[in-house]
Amino acid sequence: MGCNSGGTGDPLAMPPADPYGSGARLHELLGPATDWLDPADEESVNCTGIPEDRKVSVTGATVTVVDEYDETSNGAIGNYYVQDSLTEPVAFSGITVYSPGFSPPDLRVIPGDVMDLLGTLIEFPGPSGSEFPFCRTLPEIGGAMEFRFEGGGATPAIIDVEDLGLYDNARQWLGMLVTIHDVTLREDGYGSESGRYSFRIEAGPGLSGSEIPTIANELFDLQSFNEGGDNPPVLTAGMQVQSVTGIITYFYGVHISPRSAEDIVL
């Protein structure tokens, strides 16, 4: 009578599912703009090589901020900023989510929520007829956001302020929550008729015009923080600030946009 040499052995172990999902991560989709930047085309009239819009599925991105501050008083709210849910942030891992829809439709998203995104990745070249110079673009996603779970919030990337001095360098941080240290203000705060309020900051030698990055009021009332009440301005030309935390944005120039007064450490 034959012996049965077969055994049940240990059951196959199934790897645990990734709580952040199996979709793409932002840093896998984004990268430098070297294929289409043109330093000779200031008016951006002959831009070639800008990537076509493409469908993407991103999972496990953490919401860093919801733009609820209308600095221009013309409805400039509704953007969301998300980045890959990483303990140590990496370059090209954040993006603007432009006027998204939600699943379910009544979903209300707050910073720290971990979301999936299904939509279209675009390289926005600027408003029609007033394109960004030198064929620069702003990566954005438009589409639907779906709730995955409540997370613990995003970790800011610690970067050098000189990374913001030129678009080519700053692009890797667009849409991301970052912290810069030892920030020197080039001049007092200044406003515009549109409602924007900014501070130009030192970011290396030889910069001029729109190459100079700014601290901007895109996400909170920076002017009231600086000039509110009867006290002298909090921030003045020549002052060195210990640190500024905020979202890196681009609109004809590179900006760091604090989320609240707590993001500015004097």
Image (cartoon, helix red, strand yellow):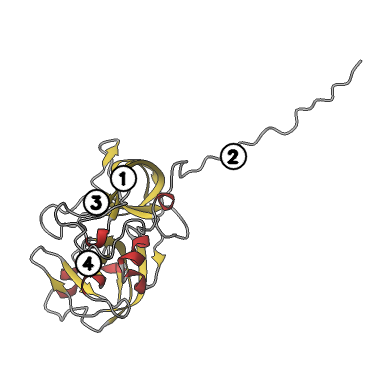
Look at label 1 and name its amino acid: Glu
Mark positioned earlier in the residue sequence (1 or 4): 1
How far is the residue under mark 2 from the one under mark 1? 36 Å
The image quarter in which residue 155 lies: bottom left
Report which residue position mark 3 lands on. 79
Image disc number at residue 52: 1
Q: Is residue 49 visible?
A: yes
Mark positioned earlier in the residue sequence (1 or 3): 1
Image disc number at residue 64: none
How far is the residue under mark 3 from the one under mark 2? 36 Å
Helix, strand or loop for disc 3: loop
Q: Name the residue nearer the viewer: 159 or 53.
A: 53
Give the x, y percent position of residue 210.
22, 70
Give the x, y percent position of residue 259.
27, 62
Helix, strand or loop for disc 2: loop
Crowd tier of the residue under label 4, counting other residues whose Cα lies within 10 Å: few below 14, some 14–19, many 20 or above: many
Look at label 2 and name its amino acid: Pro
At 12% across and 75% down in the image, what residue appears?
A: 229
Q: Residue furthest bottom?
A: 238
Q: Is residue 3 above or below residue 45?
A: above
Q: Is residue 88 above or below residue 151?
A: below
Horizontal relation, residue 158 to residue 204: left or right: right
Report which residue position mark 4 lands on. 216
Q: Residue furthest top?
A: 1
Give the x, y percent position of residue 1.
92, 15
Report which residue position mark 2 lands on. 15
